[in-house]
Amino acid sequence: MEKTDITIIGAGVVGLAVAAELARPGMNVFILEQNARHGEGISSRNSEVIHAGIYYPEGSLKAELCLAGNRMLYESARRRGIPHQKVGKLIVAADPLETGELERLFTQGRKNGAAALEMMGGEHIARMEPNIRARAALYSPETGIISAHDLMNDFLARALENQAHLICRTRVIRIEQENNAWRILTRNDRGEESTFLSGVVINCAGLASDTVANMMGGAYRLYYCKGDYCGISGVKPGLVRRLIYPAPLKNSVGLGVHLTMDLNGRLKLGPDATYIDRVEDYTVAPEKAALFYEHAVKFLPFLKPENVSADMAGIRPKRQGPKDAFADFAIRADAPGFINLVG
């Protein structure tokens, strides 16, 4: 029976980053991916934003890794020539209640280590972004955007250069412990099954990471939280130069409908946040455009209804349900040589 040193389940951005770090000449590393190629899942359905660690609770893994990841992403992108831009972000408030929420975020962000945050009033905002409407704002200069596909391609290239093997169209069916290794049963898209042994298994399966973890007797449960996007067209280029987010509502699921942009300057609104059944449904209802417009025109007064249209969707794997308190990433070895990354 074939044996490999390390098996990474999932070839999204997390699995590929792990592979890039662990692959070495002389070490046998398998990367298993259920789709036809790498990065076709939720890693390609997001805002491509490099966050700065503002929103997460102090001391959480999400806060710690967001800050560390921010620095590492910019450094790696500069060194490796990955397209990116540190555009900055304004979180805007329309009234005193929302201004109070910005002040809370400012305090929380500073506790998390986001030292460059700055509160500003209307005149300062008008100089930075004259085409938006806001009473106050929290400015995050370390927030940026990156090409997720170029980032994933770079991780994969690094892994393949060090003799890792990417195996696509292959699902993991069963994992069992066998002596000091793991017996993995897989099935490809032709229905053919194969079995091999792996010294270490690293579960980076994204939306299915709880299912993979539970093959070894775990008790994980992920909830699917869908985020729809709407595109913006027909507006003058360069009206906005930074990401613009509304002040988050207390006890809200997401960050509110916000304005992001890609490296080509294309503007998008979203995502929103809606818990759904465990079905990968990426359709966006056309009526979302009117709803997004109503939210966004409050701080983007140049928008007209005809500028906004339904675009794309992504799904967030969350460890907390719609009425649950915050749940952090689970990154742990639940058995010797079996490492789960869930959430």
Image (cartoon, rainbow, N blue to C red):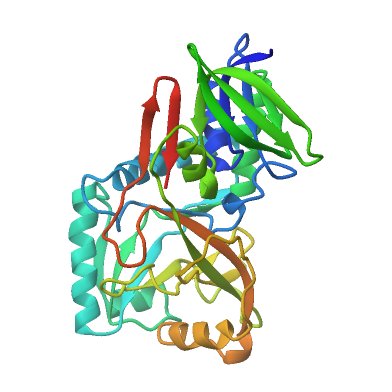
Residue 302 visible in the displayed image: no
Q: Is residue 281 left or right of residue 87?
A: right
Q: Residue furthest bottom?
A: 305
Front residue of 192/65: it is: 192
Whole-percent x, y for residue 204 in the image: 52, 38
Q: Which residue is at 55% across, 58% downward?
A: 46
Q: Is residue 183 left or right of residue 274?
A: right
Q: Is residue 70 above or below residue 32?
A: below
Q: Which residue is at 70% across, 45% downward?
A: 35
Whole-percent x, y for residue 295 in the image: 44, 84
Whole-percent x, y for residue 112 in the image: 23, 48
Residue 243 visible in the displayed image: yes
Q: Is residue 191 above or below residue 127?
A: above
Q: Is residue 129 left or right of residue 267?
A: left
Front residue of 286/55: it is: 286
Front residue of 174/245: it is: 174
Number of numbered discs visible in the structure rendering: 0
Q: Residue furthest top?
A: 26
Q: Is residue 314 above or below residue 190?
A: below
